[in-house]
């Protein structure tokens, strides 16, 4: 029993760190632009397919999917930002309009993915990220989990460093604090927001590389579920505070692993139950101080 | 040639017109007070000058160059700074606020100017790593002033610097502004606190989005409209 609990807790932390990476891009985009990217899960799915294609067709390590995700985010993200976001922000209710617009974009991406990759589930060879297991406190987890966690921690740490140590990071936080004040300070808000948008997509794509390993497979229809889970995670942590996503991810990861270990058939309810409980008890999220606007 | 010159400026929010043909000028090294009650259009005018609101018609010229089509960051690069009522980013540290005040300057320039400003505001220097949200109202105003001074603007637009402050802090703000004026920065101060008239070379009385009266400080002080509205005489 104690061994099972240890397994669930350690596994939950690892799983939670990975799910922090899954959700952090969505929270970054919301925090900076106050828009909800309902196509977030579809960008994660594209990252998964990128890794799959690199591995299957070119024989490359799936980790090359990460630079591919960054390049893809730049190529797709900049035009998408300038085509959509400035217009949304001129509307009376950018949050609601973004819901509708990005829902449409999500459907388009999913339909194109079915067209391009087929509707089947795809998985990657389990040994591409290491064939063995790595143990901690007597509990062993596949190498691929540890690689995913390492990349997640590096990505989240990198984002923290960007916020805390760079001029663009200060500017990004300034926009998150007050968009008009940022404009009045001389920050080119559109340029900084576009960078944050691209970073949000890149983080989603990078997380997608590990989806075939941690979730078993990738298919065009996984995007909606991933967006829902990401949304639950960032609300649990703190909507609009990207680093709060880590808290949300850990709570989600621990909750899910504990349920999977002891009450497996109920585990799918975890994100939604947590979401409802947090919204009722602490609407600003575990790390939030003010009542959010969405 | 005036440093800032507005001719027939109209502007507003959405479809609601607030400004109805404002003519105004600020000379180099001059301090001009924009006096008016709540909802007179003072904030709208400053936000239009800096580019946060579009100029619907009319002209805004700075050092002879038309500004009205430029985005705010380009106007600021030309030597204008704007201190809003909030004036700071509460979730950033004092040091980060100062850093952002010189957003388009090099790190070396910001370090040099930041050091001078911390000499001028020793209370802020002691708390440089604290969040701006932890400061009192008066200290936040000081940080707001320090933040806009980092870029050494030629023209500083200030929106209600006395807003939300106790009289003792208003005095402090005025003292700091006197120092600023000594450095040659032109000021356009939007205020409903008539105490700021003591700083001004000239003033404009604004009401209902129109200039009702303009003149030198002495002329405004002698004006019946100002005396009735602001001195209670």
Image (cartoon, coloured by chain):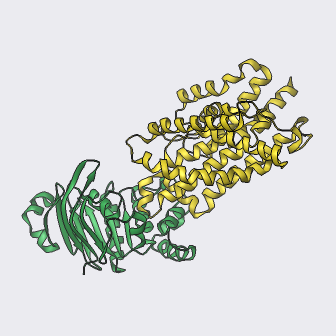
Horizontal and vertical percent for residue A179? 44, 53
Colour in which chain A is drawn: yellow
Q: Nearer the viewer, residue A61 or A176?
A: A61
Image coordinates of residue B104 in percent, x first then y, are 50, 70
**Total marks placed:** 0
Q: Residue at x 72, y 52 (%)?
A: A68
Location of residue B153 with respect to A24 vertically, above or below: below
Q: Which residue is at a point 62% across and 24% down the rendered structure image? A: A273
Chain coloured green: B
**Does residue B160 show up?**
no
Quadrant of residue B168 in the image? bottom left
Residue at 48% across, 57% down: A190
Above or below residue A13? Residue B125 is below
Residue A216 against residue B24 in the figure, above or below:
above
B55 vs B107, left or right, is left
The one nearer the camera, A127 or B92, is A127
- Residue drawn at x 50%, y 56% as measured from the top left: A174
A124 displayed left or right of A174: right
Say whether residue A184 is left or right of residue A209: left
> Is B26 or A190 nearer to us in this picture?
A190
Q: Quarter-wise, where is residue B233 in the image? A: bottom left
Q: Locate residue A1, reporting x and y percent.
A: 86, 22
The reply to whether residue A288 is in sight is: yes
Furthest residue toward front = A115
């Amino acid at each position: 029993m104690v061994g099972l609990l240890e397994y669930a807790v350690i596994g939950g932390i690892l799983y939670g760190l990975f799910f922090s990476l899954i959700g952090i891009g969505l929270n970054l985009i919301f925090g900076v632009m106050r828009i909800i990217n309902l196509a977030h899960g579809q960008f994660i799915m594209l990252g998964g397919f990128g890794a799959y294609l690199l591995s299957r067709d070119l024989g490359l390590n799936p980790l090359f999917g990460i630079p591919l995700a960054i390049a893809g985010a730049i190529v797709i993200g900049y035009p998408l930002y300038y085509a959509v976001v400035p217009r949304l922000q001129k509307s009376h209710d950018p949050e609601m309009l973004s819901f509708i617009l990005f829902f449409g974009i999500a459907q388009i991406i999913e339909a194109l993915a079915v067209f391009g990759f087929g509707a089947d589930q795809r998985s990657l060879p389990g040994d591409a990220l290491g064939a063995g297991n790595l143990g901690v406190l007597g509990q062993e987890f596949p190498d691929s989990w540890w690689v995913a966690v390492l990349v997640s921690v590096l990505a989240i740490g990198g984002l923290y460093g960007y916020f805390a140590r760079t001029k663009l990071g200060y500017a990004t936080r300034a926009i998150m604090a007050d968009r008009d004040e940022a404009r009045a300070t001389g920050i080119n808000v559109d340029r900084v927001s576009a960078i944050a948008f691209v970073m949000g997509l890149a983080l989603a794509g990078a997380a997608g590389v590990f989806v075939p390993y941690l979730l078993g497979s990738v298919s065009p229809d996984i995007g909606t579920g991933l967006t829902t889970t990401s949304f639950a995670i960032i609300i649990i942590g703190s909507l609009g505070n990207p680093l709060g996503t880590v808290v949300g991810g850990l709570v989600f990861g621990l909750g899910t692993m504990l349920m999977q270990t002891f009450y497996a058939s109920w585990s799918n309810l975890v994100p939604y139950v947590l979401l409802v409980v947090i919204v009722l008890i602490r609407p600003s999220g575990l790390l939030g101080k003010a009542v959010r606007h969405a | 040639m005036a440093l800032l010159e507005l001719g027939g400026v109209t502007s507003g929010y959405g479809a609601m017109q607030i400004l109805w043909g404002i003519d105004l000028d600020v000379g180099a090294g001059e301090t001009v007070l924009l006096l008016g009650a709540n909802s007179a259009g003072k904030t709208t005018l400053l936000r239009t000058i800096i580019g946060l609101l579009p100029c619907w018609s009319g002209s805004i010229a700075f050092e002879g160059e038309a500004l009205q089509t430029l985005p705010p960051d380009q106007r600021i690069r030309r030597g204008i700074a704007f201190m809003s009522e909030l004036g700071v980013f509460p979730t950033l540290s004092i040091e980060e606020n100062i850093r952002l005040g010189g957003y388009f300057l090099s790190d070396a320039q910001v370090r040099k100017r930041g050091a001078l400003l911390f000499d001028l505001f020793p209370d802020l220097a002691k708390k440089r790593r604290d969040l701006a949200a932890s400061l009192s109202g008066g200290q936040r105003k000081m940080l707001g002033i320090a933040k806009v001074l980092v870029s050494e603007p030629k023209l500083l637009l200030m929106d209600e610097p006395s807003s939300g402050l106790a009289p003792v802090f208003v005095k402090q703000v005025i003292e700091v502004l006197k120092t600023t004026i000594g450095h040659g920065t032109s000021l356009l101060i939007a205020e409903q606190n008539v105490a700021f008239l003591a700083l001004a070379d000239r003033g404009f009385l604004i009401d209902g989005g129109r200039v009702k009266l303009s003149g030198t400080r002495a002329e405004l002080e002698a004006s019946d409209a100002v005396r009735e509205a602001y001195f209670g005489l």
